Image (cartoon, grey):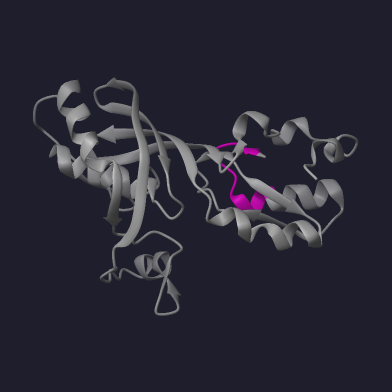
Amino acid sequence: MDKPAGPTSHGMVSFLRRLTGIKRIGHAGTLDPFASGLLIMGIGRQATKRLGSFLKQDKEYEATLSLGSTTSTFDPEGEVTSRYGGPVIGADVVEKALKDFSGKQKQVPPMFSAKKVGGKKLYELARAGKEIEREPCDVEIYELEILNYAWPELKVRVKCSSGTYIRSLAHDIGAELGCGAHLKELRRTAIGGFSVKEAALPESLSTGNWQSRLIP
């Protein structure tokens, strides 16, 4: 499915349950409500059993960064925590900085994430006003390409390993540039060999045609 910005990933599960009348439905890899794009859905027992095989596959995104401001969640859903008052950052400086983020690297998971530490999800601790030390994770960014840059918005295409947090990448790019940044928009365009170009929008599905969109 091509999830629109706004609904939760679980909301897409509920939508398909109502549409199909099938309760055993799941998805492979959550998208935040503000994000849009590819969400692989499994319908029925056999399909949901296979969803785990998609979780570790490489991902591709189009991300819009808002340079010059940071937020508590590293994305548009948090409170603004800092604003930059310096000069506009030139495109050549941005391009040079992005080169430092290609390849294998360590990335610290954001506090507002579903990653579990000590049996508790980080976002649960964050909402309780607690911040704990997080162990950096191994990630790899295969491609990082500028699609458009007009201060303060920077749009990039990212192809990366599973487990990469794009909002952490946005935050880290802002820190590298010295102006701060947060993730403004996010669209997942691919998971492994699956492309959002082949995905179905919710409004295109009906009780009469949803079965024709199934991938055996």
If the image is split into quadrants, where does the N terminus sit? top right
- How far across and down, in percent of the image, does residue 35 sit? 50, 41
Where, by quadrant of the figure, is residue 182 drawn?
Answer: top left
- Can residue 179 be seen at all in this image of the molecule? no
**Residue lying at the far bottom of the rendered structure:** 118
* Residue placed most toward the observer, 172 or 107: 107
Q: Can residue 160 be found in the magenta stretch?
A: no
What residue is drawn where x is 40% and y is 36%? 158
Farthest residue in the left direction?
86
Specify whether 210 is left or right of 104.
right
Measured from the top left, where is residue 96 in percent x and y? 17, 30
Q: Which of 123 and 26 is in front in this view?
A: 26
Residues in magenta, as a range: 2-12
5 with respect to 2 (left or right): left
Q: In this view, does 125 lie above or below 16?
A: below
Residue 40's place in the image compared with 137, above or below, is above
Q: Give the tally of numbered discs.
A: 0
Q: Is residue 7 magenta?
A: yes
Q: Which residue is drawn at 84% across and 56% down?
A: 22
